[in-house]
Image (cartoon, rainbow, N blue to C red):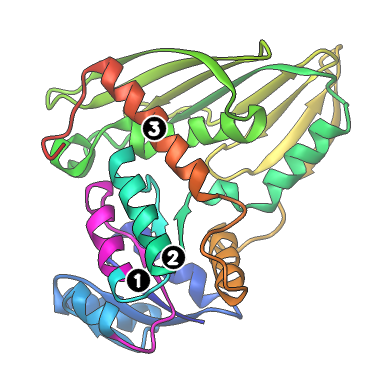
Amino acid sequence: MKIGILGSGSIATLMAKTIAGMEDAECYAVASRDLKRAQKFAKEYGFQKAYGSYEELVKDTEVELIYIATPHSHHFAHAKLCISHKKPVLCEKAFTANAKQAKELLEYAKEQKVFITEAIWTRYMPMRDKIKEVLDSGVIGEPHMLTANLGYRIDEVPRMQDPALAGGALLDVGVYTLNFASMIFGDEVADITSTCTYTDTGVDEQNSITMTYKDGKMAVLNSSMKVISDRKGIIQGSKGFMIIENINNFASITVYNPEYKEVAFYPCPTQITGYEYEVEASIQAIKNGELECLQMPHEETLHMMQVMDSLRENWGIRYPFE
C-alpha cells in the first residue's frame, strides 16, 4: 500500500524508517509546508514524491493511506482535509486537541465512508495481547491495582510549552498512562482525582491521576515532561505482580510471586520500530472495507479525549483556540 506522510518532523522520520522496513507498505509521498524540507526528507528515506503543501499530497490519486505527523493542535484540520479527499487516515496521538474535535472528525469520516484510526501504537502491539494472556492465566491472581509512570525531558521542546499547539504533558505523555490503564482495567471508572503543576505558559508540566473503578480497582498514573522516569507499568494482584518495562513501547513482562521471586519473563518480539503494527492494522482494515481498527475503536478514541478534557477542566487549562 502506498503511504503518504503529512508532516516531516521527528515522528515522521520514525514512521518513514518503519515503512521502509515493511513488505506490505511503500514510502510513496511526503508533504511539508517547506518544499525543500520535503525533498530532503524524500531523498533521505526513499520516497517517490515530495510536496510543498498538504493539499498536493491529498490530491495525489496514488496515495492509499496518509499518516498525520503534525502537532495535536493541527490534527483536526489535517485529518479533515484528508477525509474530504477520501484519503484513509492514520492520525498520530493525541487524536485531536479535545473531544469536540474528535467527535466531529469521527462523524465526518463515517459520513464520508473513509477509514480513520488513532496511531496510539501501544494499542496495536503484540505485547498488549501477551499482557492480557498472562493476566488471564491467573498467575498473579486477581489484579486490584496498577501504577504507570512515564516522563521525558522534553520541557524545552517549543511545542510542549505552547498552549496554541495544545502543549503540556497530558496529551503528549499522559495519554500513554491513560491508555495503559484502559487496556488493563477497562473504562468503568467511578471516580477520578488528579493534580498537576504548570509551566510559565500555563500548560501542565507534570500530573498525577488516580482512577477508582466501579469494581474497586485503582490505577495511579504519573506523567511528566521534566524528568526521566522508569517508564514502568506495574500490575498488582492477589497472588503476585507483574512489571511491564516501558509502557510507551512494551519491552518486556516480568512476573513475580508472593515471595518477590521472578517466576516468568516475556521479552518483546523483534520489531522494526513498533510502529509497523498500527500500519499493518490500518492496511488490513482498509482492505476489509472497515472504517476503524478493532485495536482502537472510534468509541475508545472519543472516550480517551473526553477523559483528558475533564482532567484539563479540573486543572483550569484551556487552549486559546477552544
Is residue 88 among what the camera can see?
yes
Q: Residues within 10 Å of mark 2 (few under 14, many from 20)?
A: many
Q: Residues within 10 Å of mark 1 (few under 14, many from 20)?
A: many
Which badge, 1 or 3, comes first in the chain's sequence?
1
- Which residue corresponds to mark 1? 5
Q: In the image, is residue 26 above or below residue 163?
A: below
For numbered disc 1, what is the local secondary structure?
A: strand
Which badge, 2 or 3, comes first in the chain's sequence?
2
Residue 293 location, quadrant: bottom right
| Circles 2, 3 touching at the beta carbon (< 8 Å) | no
Q: Amino acid at mark 2?
A: Met
Is residue 157 among what the camera can see?
no
Task: Please tell me whether mark 1 or mark 3 is closer to you in this view.
Answer: 3
Point out which mark residue 194 bears.
none
Q: Is residue 142 left or right of residue 172?
A: right
Q: CA distance from mark 2 to mark 3?
A: 27 Å
Q: CA distance from mark 1 to mark 3?
A: 27 Å
Which range is magenta? 60-83
Q: Position of residue 1 (x, y in %)?
A: 52, 82
Point out which mark residue 306 bears.
3
- Which residue corresponds to mark 2? 15
